[in-house]
Amino acid sequence: MVGRLERNKDLLQVAVENTATRVGSIASIITTAVADVAREIGELVTDGFEMRDAARAARHAEVERAVDPVEQEKLPDDEQH
């Protein structure tokens, strides 16, 4: 027959094991969430860099296409900017 002390020890052991398992699961969920958030922030920043570079390239292309006003008068009407 199992004594009261041994039953309480078994109950405490199961409770501690269950708690440890649940805390581990919660920690894993949090770790995954933090990693996902970090990845999304990184992609957002990367998108920002790409948009900045595209805007810079567009400005550069616009400057390259700019024609001196005197030269523009010599161009046919469909080529003037």
Image: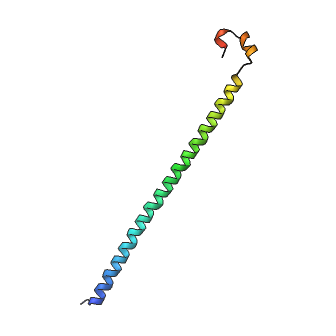
User: How has the structure been colored for display?
Assistant: rainbow
Judged from this view, the residue extending furthest toward the front is: 69
**Residue appearing at x 76%, y 14% in the figure:** 70
Q: Which residue appears at 56% of the width and 49% of the height?
A: 42
Front residue of this view, candidates 57 and 32: 57
Residue 66: x and y in percent read 70, 22
Left or right: residue 11 compared with residue 78: left
Is 37 located above or below residue 69 in the figure? below
The tally of labels here is 0
Q: Is residue 50 left or right of residue 14?
A: right
**Residue 48 appears at what percent x and percent y?**
58, 42
**Foreground residue, 1 or 4?**
4
Q: Given the current orientation, which residue lies at the most extreme left position?
A: 1
Quarter of the image for the N terminus: give it. bottom left
Q: Is residue 63 above or below residue 48?
A: above
Name the residue rendered at 66%, 32% in the picture.
57
Q: Which of the image's four quarters has the C terminus? A: top right
Residue 33 % position (x, y)? 46, 57
Task: Say whether residue 79 is left or right of residue 9.
Answer: right
- Image check: 33 left or right of 67? left
Quarter where residue 3 is shown: bottom left
- Residue 32 in the image: above or below residue 77: below
Quadrant of residue 15 within the rendered picture: bottom left
Where residue 19 sits, quadrant-wise, is bottom left
Name the spot of residue 52 as percent of width and height, x first. Answer: 62, 38
Rendered residue at 35%/80% (across/down): 13
